[in-house]
């Protein structure tokens, strides 16, 4: 019973006074105050982040649109250069340094989609096609330059062989005249060779040569005017003329070989030119398509 008396002492009968209640109140206020302040800070940070995100979105979109505007101008100039080059075919093609999409490295494309929204499928498809086209410009200038270099290299290679037509008109012809001619006469100040009556190869060769020099559509005082017509009206007929005297006439074999080389060279030049300008038109189509997509996006 001694223990019971101990627990019934005055210490255990103490009741909370006003200070205790005040302390509890302060604690409660502190808790709610801290929560309110934390909520305000979180809300402010949230809105600041949203504002910054909107600012970043706006700046990314503006940068993208400004870059597209500049690119469109460069592409338009390159299109004009390609058209002029295709028309003149003079081996002189201007390259616009602004035809590239390097600005894509500095743009976060997710903002382009964010501006559109996930539910606008048609708009998303448009931006996908635009970006796909822009990425093709990564190696556009290099590819176009390589195409031009390759064409010029091929053309020059075949052109060197084509120049053998000069042998058929001049050096080789005069060599054969000295070997096979029996006499010559001057007619209107021009030396003309005479051949044996049975030397039909040289007679026909000479007639073909005289005819082509009288054709103003092919040769003028300024030199060769039309390579295609020279091939059609002189080289190919000479192939047939010389072929009639093969294999018994060694000189006919020589002339036939040179004429065939010239004809083949001209064919290869035409083919190289045709395929090159088909490629140029492909580059042109790419640029026109890109410009159309840019215009569609910016409108």
Image: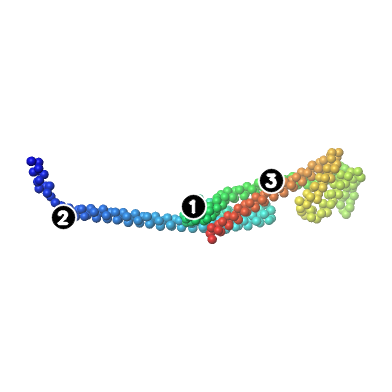
Residue on which disc 3 sits: 154
In the rendered image, residue 32, in percent from the top left (x then y), is placed at: 27, 55
Q: Judging from the image, what secondary structure is the residue with disc 2 in?
A: helix
Q: Residue furthest front?
A: 1
Disc 2: which residue: 18
- Residue 101 visible in image: no
Q: Quadrant of the C terminus?
A: bottom right
The residue sitting at the bottom extreme is: 299
**Dot 1, how many residues are within 10 Å of its Cα: few (below 14), some (14-19), or many (20+)?**
some
Q: Tell me the residue that label 1 is attached to.
A: 109
Q: Nearer the viewer, mark 2 or mark 1?
A: 2
Comparing 144 with 115, the one in front is: 115
Earlier sequence position, callout 2 versus callout 1: 2
- Callout 2 crowding tier (Cα within 10 Å): few <14, some 14–19, many ≥20: few
Left-right relation of 138 to 31: right
Q: Of circles 3 and 1, which is in front?
A: 1
Q: Residue at x 45, y 56 (%)?
A: 57
N-term-proximal mark, 3 vs 2: 2
Residue at 31%, 54% in the rendered image? 38
Q: Position of residue 30 (x, y in %)?
A: 25, 54
């Amino acid at each position: 019973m001694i223990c019971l008396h101990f627990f019934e002492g005055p210490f255990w009968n103490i009741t909370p006074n006003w200070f205790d209640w005040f302390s509890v109140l302060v604690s409660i206020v502190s808790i709610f105050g801290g929560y309110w302040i934390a909520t305000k800070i979180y809300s402010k940070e949230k809105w600041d982040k949203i504002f910054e995100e909107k600012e970043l979105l706006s700046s990314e979109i503006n940068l993208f649109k400004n870059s597209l505007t500049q690119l469109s101008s460069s592409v338009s100039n390159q299109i004009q250069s390609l058209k002029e080059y295709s028309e003149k075919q003079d081996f002189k093609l201007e390259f616009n340094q602004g035809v590239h999409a390097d600005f894509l490295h500095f743009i976060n494309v997710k903002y382009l989609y964010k501006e559109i929204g996930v539910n606008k499928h048609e708009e998303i498809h448009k931006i996908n096609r635009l970006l796909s086209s822009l990425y093709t410009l990564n190696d556009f200038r290099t590819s176009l330059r390589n195409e031009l270099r390759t064409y010029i290299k091929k053309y020059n290679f075949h052109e060197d062989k084509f120049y053998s037509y000069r042998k058929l008109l001049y050096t080789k012809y005069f060599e054969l005249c000295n070997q096979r001619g029996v006499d010559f006469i001057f007619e209107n100040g021009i030396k003309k060779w005479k051949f044996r009556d049975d030397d039909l190869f040289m007679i026909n060769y000479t007639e073909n040569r005289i005819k082509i020099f009288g054709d103003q559509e092919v040769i003028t005082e300024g030199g060769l005017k039309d390579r295609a017509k020279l091939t059609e009206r002189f080289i190919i007929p000479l192939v047939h003329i010389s072929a009639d005297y093969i294999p018994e006439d060694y000189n006919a074999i020589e002339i036939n070989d040179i004429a065939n080389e010239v004809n083949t060279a001209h064919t290869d030049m035409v083919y190289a030119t045709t395929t090159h300008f088909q490629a140029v038109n492909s580059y042109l189509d790419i640029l026109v398509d890109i410009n159309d997509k840019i215009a569609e996006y910016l409108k």
